[in-house]
């Protein structure tokens, strides 16, 4: 395990330091490209001219929707990826192919438990072992996402919104009905 982690860390260090790549370039080369995630990017500014760019909304106290700020993340690793549902499915079904088998297996094994509640943490995944899935959620200006992968099966469930709402419970219901 330590050898696998060391090898991955060395590869990322090489990509960032030796080649001079920035984070977005490294992710494109090491993750997006190999998984065929051709509709995913780390934009440096809001893509106003892109007709496919989503508009995020905030809910005002009076119940009206207003467009959210045209912000992009200043820290790409934390919230900078713009993706589509189709590309997120590609990630959900293919992420383990990017890792040595032993490390991919460890990613879906509990490494730590929540202080309260049934959740556990794998390596990069929130785990619900009772229901047999791993998940990730995201929220940003005017949007939210939920990705669920079924442990041991190449199946992913994705829910995306253009408003800040907790979409994970809905995605869990879809997962439970579909598995």
Image: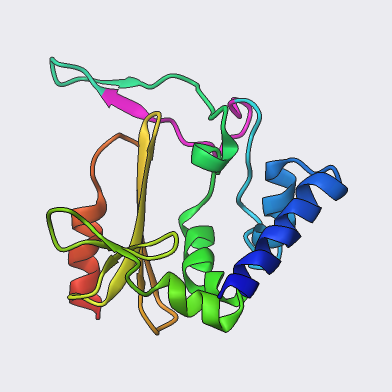
Q: Position of residue 81 (x, y in %)?
A: 55, 43
In the image: residue 48, left or right of residue 56? right
Q: Position of residue 71 (x, y in %)?
A: 50, 23
In the image: residue 106, left or right of residue 159? right
Residue placed most toward the observer, 63 or 121: 121
Residue placed most toward the observer, 110 or 153: 110
Please give the name of the residue rendered at 74% of the width and 61% of the height, measured from the top-left corner: 11
Please give the name of the residue rendered at 65% of the width and 61% of the height, measured from the top-left corner: 31
Q: Is residue 128 visible?
A: yes
Indicate the quadrant where residue 130 lies.
bottom left
Residue most extreme to the front: 2
Residue placed most toward the observer, 17 or 95: 17
Residue segment shown in magenta: 46-58
Q: Is residue 98 visible?
A: no
Q: Is residue 31 magenta?
A: no
Residue most extreme to the right: 19
**Color style of the picture:** rainbow
Classify the position of the N terminus by image quarter.
bottom right
Q: Main secondary structure of the magenta part?
A: loop
Q: How many marks?
A: 0
Residue placed most toward the observer, 62 or 23: 23
Q: Is residue 56 magenta?
A: yes
Please give the name of the residue rendered at 56% of the width and 83% of the height, measured from the top-left corner: 101
Indicate the quadrant where residue 95 lies.
bottom right
Q: Position of residue 140 (x, y in %)?
A: 40, 34
Classify the position of the C terminus by image quarter.
bottom left
Please give the name of the residue rendered at 44% of the width and 59% of the height, measured from the top-left corner: 124
Q: Position of residue 87 (x, y in %)?
A: 54, 60
């Amino acid at each position: 395990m330590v050898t696998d982690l060391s090898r991955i860390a060395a590869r990322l260090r090489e990509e960032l330091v030796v080649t001079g790549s920035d984070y977005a370039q490294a992710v494109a080369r090491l993750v997006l490209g190999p998984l065929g995630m051709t509709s995913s990017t780390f934009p440096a500014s809001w893509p106003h001219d892109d007709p496919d760019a989503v508009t995020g909304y905030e809910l005002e106290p009076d119940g009206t929707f207003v467009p959210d700020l045209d912000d992009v993340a200043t820290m790409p690793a934390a919230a900078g990826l713009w993706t589509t549902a189709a590309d997120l499915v590609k990630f959900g079904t293919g992420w383990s192919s990017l890792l040595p088998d032993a490390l991919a297996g460890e990613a879906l094994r509990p490494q730590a438990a929540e202080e309260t509640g049934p959740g556990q943490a794998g390596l990069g995944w929130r785990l619900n072992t009772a229901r047999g899935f791993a998940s990730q959620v995201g929220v940003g200006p005017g949007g939210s996402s939920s990705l669920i992968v079924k442990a041991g099966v190449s199946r992913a469930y994705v829910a995306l919104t253009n408003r800040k709402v907790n979409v994970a419970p809905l995605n869990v219901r879809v997962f439970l009905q579909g598995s």
